[in-house]
Amino acid sequence: MSIEEVSTNFSGTNSSLATRVAEERAAYERRRKEREEAHLYMSIQVASEANFKMYQGFDIVPWKDDTDSPARPKQYRVLRATTMSQFCEMVANDLEVEADMIRPWAMVNRQNGTARPDVPITFPDMTVEEAANKFGTKTTSFRLWIEKADTRDGEGNALFGDKLLDLKAHQNNRPLMLFLKHFDAKTQSLFGVGNFYAALQDKVCDVSPQILKLLGWPAGTNFKLHEVGSLVKFPFNAADNDRKLNKT
């Protein structure tokens, strides 16, 4: 090996070492800055219908699961001063929809260990920290369900499912957001199908058309309804079932 070759190899080694040192220094500075600014940020878990459809379990999504799966809610780390409007822009961009076509719902814990959407957050100028303090639960992160509208009204406003519901002027009637799962007896699998709205005073037969449509089954198909996570069962017969949806 010539002196020129040794010199060239040595110079190449120095260059590589300098690059590595610079990268390590930059990584250290980045971690230091993250530690110093950690108090300015908060974590938000966001679940959507896409996650629900991929989850095989009793809850709507695996909130506490650390495995990387399509059912797992997306984790956001955002500045506490971020407004809900700004945050919805981020989420809408990830979901590839227009921001006004989504609506965030705060989650509430249930006695059976699951969580369900509780109230929509309709304050666009509220910061995510304020929303978490007002609507959040005592968990390590703020949990949100993202509802998507499928259509707009004549003035271009997003039409969410509750606005399309006929409450039939019944006293104390109100819209309920329901989540439909399908248990396949052959494969012993339970997956989310979708969510829809029904009125509190509706009978099971009133919602059967929506259920059959979501499942892609013919009209008149008989099926059984169970409340997930409990032993409550609603046997359904298209001809005579009149049980009311008195579950909240």
Image (tube, rainbow, N blue to C red):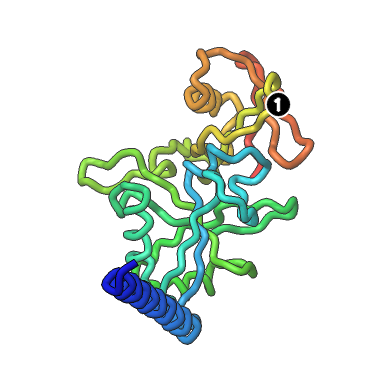
Is residue 40 visible from the viewing direction of this image?
A: no
Query: Hey, which residue is sitting farthest bottom in the picture?
Result: 36
Name the residue nearer the viewer: 237 or 218. 218
**Which residue is labeled 1 in the image?**
188
Name the element at disc 1.
Answer: loop
Which residue type does callout 1 highlight?
Gln
**Where does residue 241 sit, x and y in percent of width and height?**
65, 21
Q: Is residue 132 left or right of residue 108?
A: left
How many residues crowd around disc 1 within 10 Å: few (fewer than 14), some, or many (20 or more)?
Answer: few
Q: Is residue 29 above or below residue 206?
A: below
Seen in the image, is 215 located left or right of residue 151?
right
Q: Pinpoint residue 135: horizontal percent, then vertical percent.
A: 54, 67
Extreme-left residue of the structure: 155
Tell me where residue 239 appears, x and y as whole percent.
62, 13
Residue drawn at the location 47% of the way across and 70% of the way down: 131
Judge by depth and name the residue closer to the eye, 148 or 208. 148
**Residue drawn at (34%, 66%) of the image:** 1
